[in-house]
Amino acid sequence: MKKFAAFDELRPKLEKQYENVVYSQKDCWSEEQLRTAWETHKSQNPNEERILSRAFLTALILRHAPVGVEPFNPFPGKFETFNLLQEDLKEGYKLAAEKVPGVVCNGADMELGIGWMVDRSHVAPDWKKLLAIGLPGLIERAKNGSSPFHRSVVMVYEALAEFCRRIAVVNDNPVYEAIADHPPRTLHEAFALAYVLHDAIEFANEEVRTMGRFDSLYIDFYRNDLKAGRLDRDSAKELIKFFWIAFYAHYQGKRFGKNFCFGPDINELSRLALEAYYEMDIVDPKLSILVRDDMPQDFAELYASCIRDGRTAIVSLNYQVVVDGMIRHGRTPEDAADFVPIGCYEPAVAGKEISCSGSSHLYLPVPLLQVINNGLEYSTFDDFKNAYLEQIRKNCTIMAERQILCDLAWKYVNPVPLLSGTFDSCMEKERDISDSGALYNSTGCVISYLADAVDSLEAVRYLVYEEKLCTLSELRKILKDNWQGHEKLRMTVLRRTAKWGNNNPRIDDLAIEIAAFASKILFKLPNGRGGFFYPSLYGQLVVEKGKLIGALPSGRLAGEPMSKNMDAVIGMDRNGITALMDSVLKVDMRQFPCGTCLDIMLHPTAVQGDEGIQILVSIIRAFIAHGGSGIQFNIFDAAVLRDAQIHPEKYTNLQVRVCGWNVRFTDLTKDAQETFIRQAEAM
């Protein structure tokens, strides 16, 4: 195995490895040559199927584009695309518009509180298949078929193997020659193969959002290397760091993070990787821990130490609740047991499912505003509530119609045989994943801002129907005025009405009813790829979307941030984290098999010392034991956050958990920073 310098010595360079790449010109084509070859191919094949033309372009780049020169790096593999794939993607969208009448491939209607899209950002190959048979095995398997799909798979994988050989020559890295010729045999080869396919798929304009269950995928490679003397524990940890820093380098912690999963069966590689993660102290990758009752205490304490000490890019997921929800939604028990988080917390069956978990959106407070603003009067609160639920149904119907068109358009937008060739079902069906090739073809719908909706519905009950402090017509005008001139009434709403997150049955029952109603609408609603919509319940992009939503009956002003994930509205969980957890746990999380998550914020003094680690472990275990689905943490002192806002140079590695990923606090906008500060101050 080629020797490399120590990770810590190379780390600054590795973190910037995607910036200012030096490309080899030896045996490479220029941009002009690549463009000429591509234009010639298109002119000679005007009626070629989209998947074949896309495969030709991908293979052209892999075989001939300039390759990055980085002999210092155990995981090289940069290549220059000259934006050819991105330009062709635009042509795909144009083709989709022609083939699918009426489609709008990426859209939102905030008047209805819905969104829809061709989701190219929540996919992953079959990592187990890839590591088991390697590129040669994938190629030989695809050669057994003669369909356009099979030919496209052969084309891209043969080109990817040739690309690996080019990397090996340019960077004097025999590992890449090895993975071109046979399945991986060492941990380094396994990491290299996974990384090179990951990058190739992403350059082909599909965003790989999970690298699979790390400890189960790589444990045999690790054990065999130890036995053969190729690695010891320290050198293996060093190799993990080299591997993970490459994912960080892509976006410098300014995107959604790359998910690596651990558990539910914990082994020695699980522990080694968490040690490496602690030592790296990095915002990306992010980790998902699949928790069962039998999770070893030492491992629980290890990852709790990461969280307590500022490495908070970790979510704990209830393995059994997720499995049960997926079975309820139609997976076999065996398949559900093999799920992997495909984004932030959204599960999909590894190697068998394309969940498109971010495809569509429903923003729960908006239908409530529609009912208030429709000019109708409702004699009782139940009548008003039922009108709200019916509006949710209507909006979901419109959303589904638009999303189904996107489902149908995907195969014209961006077929990706690099991804599909790893799926057994795609090979059997002779269809790309964009064309319903997966065994399970789900379409995620993210249902968001439950706390804002529930608090607002309760406020309507209190103001209009119980205390009669205003009529519905008057409330309509108050919201239009953004509560200006009605400050006293607003204070009454903020202080006197029940709020979600305090274990109050009065309002928690509303949350249970709304959540169950929305889930039932979407749970088995057919999509456009032969599957079903796949509901989740969490709120993200709370600052960005909040700016688009008007004033709410809850007292929230127009444009203010929305509630995050399953949390209470900022500052409204007044009875501590136990009450917050109790409210959340009343909702049956299995109704939302595409994922839910609760964020907990703690003050550093609450988790000091060894006792603090035990407190964190106890919170996680209690939440899981009582049926919670996902839980994650921020541990902040409001004074520290405020100082970081004023003196960012002093806090260059202060991490915050933003919905389902981590960023540096100093990279956030001031508005986003304020949401964390307000929450910490309220705590």
Image (cartoon, grey):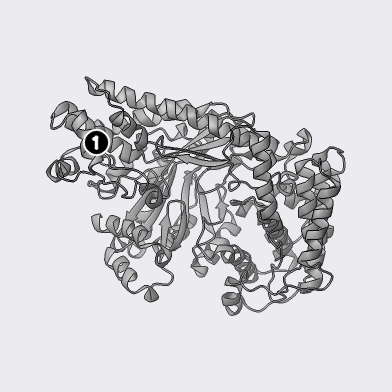
Would residue 115 appear left or right of 454 to someone viewing this image? right
Q: Nearer the viewer, residue 544 or 523?
A: 544
Where is residue 215 shown, x and y percent of the image?
A: 61, 54
Residue 111: image location, x then y, percent = 39, 37
Q: Residues within 10 Å of mark 1 (few under 14, many from 20)?
A: some
Q: Quadrant of the C terminus?
A: bottom left
Instruction: Give the quadrant of residue 69.
Output: bottom right
Rendered location of residue 420, percent (x, y): 72, 44
Please name the amino acid that badge 1 sits on. Answer: Asn
> 436 and 575: which one is in front?
436
Quickly name the residue at label 1: 504
Residue 459 in sight from this viewpoint: no
Give residue 59's position: percent from left, percent from top: 79, 55
Q: Which residue is more in the foreground, 205 or 580?
A: 205
On the image, which quarter does residue 104 sit in?
top right
Quadrant, the N terminus: bottom right
Vertical order, 464 against 584 (above or below): above
* Residue at x-position 43% and y-position 59%: 312
- How many tags in the picture? 1
Compared with 641, 335 (above or below) is: above
Is residue 137 shown left or right of residue 327?
right
Residue at image location 57% in from the left, 46% down from the top: 342
Using residue 81 as the reference point, say whether residue 649 is left or right of it: left
Whether residue 95 can be seen here: yes
285 over 518 or under it: above or below: below
Q: Residue at x 75, y 68 (%)?
A: 67
Q: Secondary structure at mark 1?
A: loop
Between residue 135 and residue 97, name the one nearer to us: 97
